[in-house]
Image (cartoon, rainbow, N blue to C red):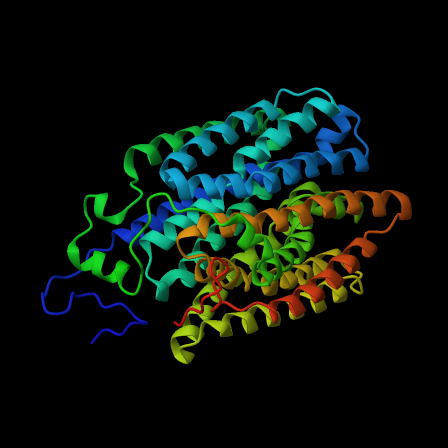
Amino acid sequence: MATTEQPADVLSGVGVRATHMRHVVLAVLCSLSVVNYLDRVCIAKSAPYMMADLGLTKVEMGLVFSAFTLAYALFEVPGGWLGDMIGPRKVITRIVVWWSMFTTFTGVVNHLWSMIAVRFLFGAGEAGTYPNSSKIISRWMPRAERGSAQGLMWMCGRWGGAFAPGLVAYMLLHMHWRSTFWVFGVVGIIWATLFWIWFRDLPQDKKGVNAAELEIIRKGQPPPVPRPKVPWLKLMKSGNLWAICWMYFCMSYGWYFYITWLPTYLEARGVSMMKSGVLGGLPLFFGGIGCILGGLLTDYVVRRTGNLRNRRFIGAAGFFCGSLCMGASVLVADPTWAMVVISMASFFGDMTMGSAWAVCLDVGHELAGTVSGCMNTWGNLGGALANVVTGFLVQHFGSWNLPIVVSGTIFFFGALLWLRIDPTRSVIDDRRTHS
């Protein structure tokens, strides 16, 4: 017998076995997440070669990293809002084509300002990926499966980023760093073409979805609104939304180290290029495991307790443990073991990803794309700040430990912010939602 928390495989009273097209859609979102991270992490591994080739200092390379992150932050809300207005199929196709073009253009720049401009436009393209993916999850997945779906999607992204350093290191042995960007750009164009042909925004519009699966997806959900109005003033006044945004600011501040400065950090500690490719992927590999476990855990806790508010305790615990690991890593002299400890910080931090993005669906309802965009905007502002601050601290104080300790401290404040979040309170009309 099905419950409201755990969908059945058979439509009650009809005896028709439900199809599983929603899981195929989730697999497509997971592949999008992999492509997104391959393009994003490629530059981190190539950074030492780019700095040598273009004559860039650490502070200047930090500006290049931050150009992407700043644009990514600025265009998150417009990207999520556009998905709410015209549908994620149109938006995702366009942004993947856009970012793939500027991934390719990264391989032809020849000085600092052209690099900053191209990476800014690349970031503008990637913005909106996850808000629109969340929009798809809100339409295609029942509430009891959303945390797991978010966790699986983020795991695939993290693992795409985890294997990217080793892949790029291998490619750099056989081609110039510029050519690596051309290869990844072509992959994105192919993905966007196939997505546009195959995907549909609404489950009822997709061939292969039967009535039984539609019943599972729709159970307990309001009907979709084609063009919902966004109460911007109410959103700006929502303390709940601001707590979510500042929490994600703390998350992204520490996390961006893994995909920007980490290969340079390992090089400074005397790690060889190929070993760096392996060690550099550990934080995202461990983080991927954290994503899926955290997603399963947040759904389990909600089903078991019947209370959406309990998502926040998973978030607070993950941030607190991540903070401890970040601080402990500076006490480890051996770079390999230091990377293991840093990777555990990534594991605990990413255990909160399913909860963080599921909370946006809990409190945002039909404006899930806009709310997710707000959260990711603020988070990436934290990442943009971290990129520059890290470069400044290392260049002026000569220490890699100082920026890591700063990241751990900010993670601790994020744990406190998690306790302020209420997943049952809508950020749109202040009504309470019950699981």
* Residue 68 horizontal/vertical position (percent): 64, 36
Is 342 or 217 nearer to us in this picture? 217
Quadrant occupied by the N terminus: bottom left
Q: Residue furthest bottom?
A: 305
Image quarter of residue 150: bottom left
User: What residue is at 82 percent from the left and 33 percent from the top?
Assistant: 57
* Residue 104 horizontal/vertical position (percent): 55, 25
Image quarter of residue 147: bottom left
Is 95 or 258 nearer to us in this picture? 95
Left or right of 328 on screen, residue 222: left
Quadrant occupied by the C terminus: bottom left
Left or right of 94 on screen, residue 111: right
User: What residue is at 38 percent from the left and 75 percent from the top?
Assistant: 303
Asked if 229 appears above or below 172 in the picture, the reply is below
* Residue 48 horizontal/vertical position (percent): 73, 35
Asked if 102 appears above or below 229 in the picture, the reply is above
Q: Is residue 34 visible?
A: no
Left or right of 382 on screen, residue 39: left
Image quarter of residue 197: top left
* Residue 145 horizontal/vertical position (percent): 36, 63
Left or right of 397 on screen, residue 133: left
Q: Is residue 242 visible?
A: yes
Image label count? 0
Asked if 40 appears above or below 117 in the picture, the reply is below
Q: Residue furthest right?
A: 397
User: What residue is at 71 percent from the left and 33 percent from the top?
Assistant: 64
Q: Residue furthest left?
A: 14
User: What residue is at 35 percent from the left and 36 percent from the top?
Assistant: 195
